[in-house]
C-alpha cells in the first residue's frame, strides 16, 4: 500500500494545510509506505519570483520536518528533481479531454483571481497532479477537501488510459481528515484559508503576537453565543473547529465549556491554545530553516529514491501505450 501527497511551495504553511493534510501525513507514515513531495512545478502556475520560489522550497521542507514528517519513515522529495513526472504528464495529456480541464473549480477560481496570468499550466495542472500519483501507482492520497475534484479527474484519467490501452493504473482513493478537511479564511469565512490569499491565513509558525492579533481580530458574527452553526455563524464555527482540532475535544464539549461566555474570552482561549500547540514545533523550525545544506541533502536523497521507483514504473507505462 503506497500513500502519496504533495504541497506547493507557494508560501508559509497555514493551519488549513496542517489540519487538512500534514497532521494526517504524520500519522500515516507509521503505517504505510509514504511519499511526500514539494510540488514546485505546480507552484509555477502562479506568478512568482525565482529567488522567492527557492526560499519557499527550503522553508516548506523545514516546516514539514518540524511538524513531524520524518525522512527516516517517509520518502521526501522535490517534484522537479524527478523528471519522470513531466514525461508521464505528456502521455496523460493525450488521454484527457480539454473539456474536463475547463470544468475544474480550481481553474475557474484561479483564472478569476489571476486574470492577467491564465497560463496553460494552470489549465493542465490536474494532469500533472494525476502524473504525480499514477507514476507511483499509489493507493491513497491524503488531501484536503479542495483537492477532491483533482483526485476524481486522476481516477478518470487512470480509467481512460486503462480502457484505451491495457490495465496499467490503480484508481487512487482520497483520504480526508473529516474535521480538518476545510478550514476557512479568518477574514472571509466563506472562502478556504489558502496561501494564495495570505491575509486570511494563520500560519503555523506565526509569532505569539501575530497569532493573538489574528485570532482576536478574526471575523466573527452577530450575536454573542459560542455556537457551532456553520451557516448562521461561519466565523465563530470556523474558530470552534480550529479549537476542537487543537485541543482534540468534541465540538459539543466546547459549546458547553463556553456557555454564557463571550467572543473575547473564547478567542483568547483559542489563541493561547494555538500558541501552546505550535511552540515546540516553531522552535524546531527556526533552527532547521537555517540548515540549508542539510535540507538540500534530504531532498537529493529522497528524489533519488523516488526516481528509482518512478523510472521503473514509467518503463511499464510507456510499453502499455506503444512507446519503445
Ligand atoms: P494552499 O491552497 O494553501 O496553497 P496547497 O494547495 O499547497 O495549499 O495544499 C496543501 C494541502 O493542504 C492539500 O492537501 C490541501 O488540500 C490542504 N489544504 C489547503 N488549504 C486547506 C484548508 N483551508 N483546509 C484544509 N485543507 C487545506
Ligand atoms: N494540488 C495539490 C494542492 O494544491 C498539491 C499536489 C500536487 C498534490 N500534486 C499532488 C497533492 C499529488 C496530492 C497528490 O494541494
Image (cartoon, helix red, strand yellow):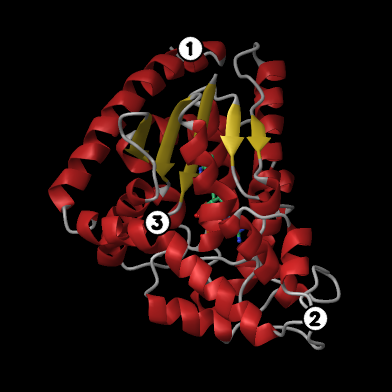
Q: In this view, which residue lies farthest toward the left?
A: 293
Q: Nearer the viewer, mark 1 or mark 3?
A: 3
Q: Does residue 187 appear anywhere in the picture?
A: no
In this picture, is 130 found above or below 11? above
In this picture, is 77 found above or below 288? above
Residue topped by disc 3: 9
Q: Residues within 10 Å of mark 3 (few under 14, many from 20)?
A: many
Q: Nearer the viewer, mark 2 or mark 3?
A: 2
Tag 2, which secondary structure? loop
Tag 1, which secondary structure? helix
The Cα atoms of the two marked residues, 1 and 3, are separated by 31 Å
Residue at x 53% of width, y 32% of height: 133
Q: In this view, which residue lies farthest toward the right?
A: 232
Quadrant of the snapshot with the C terminus: top left
Mark 2 or mark 3: whose residue is earlier in sequence: 3
Residue at x 59% of width, y 51% of height: 20
Residue topped by disc 2: 225
Residue at x 65% of width, y 45% of height: 177
Q: Residues within 10 Å of mark 1 (few under 14, many from 20)?
A: few
The Cα atoms of the two marked residues, 2 and 1, are separated by 59 Å
Percent position (x, y) of residue 189?
70, 74
- Tell me if 264 is positioned left or right of 89 in this view: right
For the residues bearing labels 2 and 1, Cβ distance under 8 angstroms: no
Percent position (x, y) of residue 285?
29, 57
* Residue closest to the eye, 222 or 49: 222
- Tell me if 317 is positioned left or right of 205 in this view: right
- Tell me if 137 is positioned left or right of 153 in this view: left
Residue 299 location, quadrant: top left
Residue topped by disc 1: 316
Mark 2 or mark 1: whose residue is earlier in sequence: 2
Amino acid at each position: 500500500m503506497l500513500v502519496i501527497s504533495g504541497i506547493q511551495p507557494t508560501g508559509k504553511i497555514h493551519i488549513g494545510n496542517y489540519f487538512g493534510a500534514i497532521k494526517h501525513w504524520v500519522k500515516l507514515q507509521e503505517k504505510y509506505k509514504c511519499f511526500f513531495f514539494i510540488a514546485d512545478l505546480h507552484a509555477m502556475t502562479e506568478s512568482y519570483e525565482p529567488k522567492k520560489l527557492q526560499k519557499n522550497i527550503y522553508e516548506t521542507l523545514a516546516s514539514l520536518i518540524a511538524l513531524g514528517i520524518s525522512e527516516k519513515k517517509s520518502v521526501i522529495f522535490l517534484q522537479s528533481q524527478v523528471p519522470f513526472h513531466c514525461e508521464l504528464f505528456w502521455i496523460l495529456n493525450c488521454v484527457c479531454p480539454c473539456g474536463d480541464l475547463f470544468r475544474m473549480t480550481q481553474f475557474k477560481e484561479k483564472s478569476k483571481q489571476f486574470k492577467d496570468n491564465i497560463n496553460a499550466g494552470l489549465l493542465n495542472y490536474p494532469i500533472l497532479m494525476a502524473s504525480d500519483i499514477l507514476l507511483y501507482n499509489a493507493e491513497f492520497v491524503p488531501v484536503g477537501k479542495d483537492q477532491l475534484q483533482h483526485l476524481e479527474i486522476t481516477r478518470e484519467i487512470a480509467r481512460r488510459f486503462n480502457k484505451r490501452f491495457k490495465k496499467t493504473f490503480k484508481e487512487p482513493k482520497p483520504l480526508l481528515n473529516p474535521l480538518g478537511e476545510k478550514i476557512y479564511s479568518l477574514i472571509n469565512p466563506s472562502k478556504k484559508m489558502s496561501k494564495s490569499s495570505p491575509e486570511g491565513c494563520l500560519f503555523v509558525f506565526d509569532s505569539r503576537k501575530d497569532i493573538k492579533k489574528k485570532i482576536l481580530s478574526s471575523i466573527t458574527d452577530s450575536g454573542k453565543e459560542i455556537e457551532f452553526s456553520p451557516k448562521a455563524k461561519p466565523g465563530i464555527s470556523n474558530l470552534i473547529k480550529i479549537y476542537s482540532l487543537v485541543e482534540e475535544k468534541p465540538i459539543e464539549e466546547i459549546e458547553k465549556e463556553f456557555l454564557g461566555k463571550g467572543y473575547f474570552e473564547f478567542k483568547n482561549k483559542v489563541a493561547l491554545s494555538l500558541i501552546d500547540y505550535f511552540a515546540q514545533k516553531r522552535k524546531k523550525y527556526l533552527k532547521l530553516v537555517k540548515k540549508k545544506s542539510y535540507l538540500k541533502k534530504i531532498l537529493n536523497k529522497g528524489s533519488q529514491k523516488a526516481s528509482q521507483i518512478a523510472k521503473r514504473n514509467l518503463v511499464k507505462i510507456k510499453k502499455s501505450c506503444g512507446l519503445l
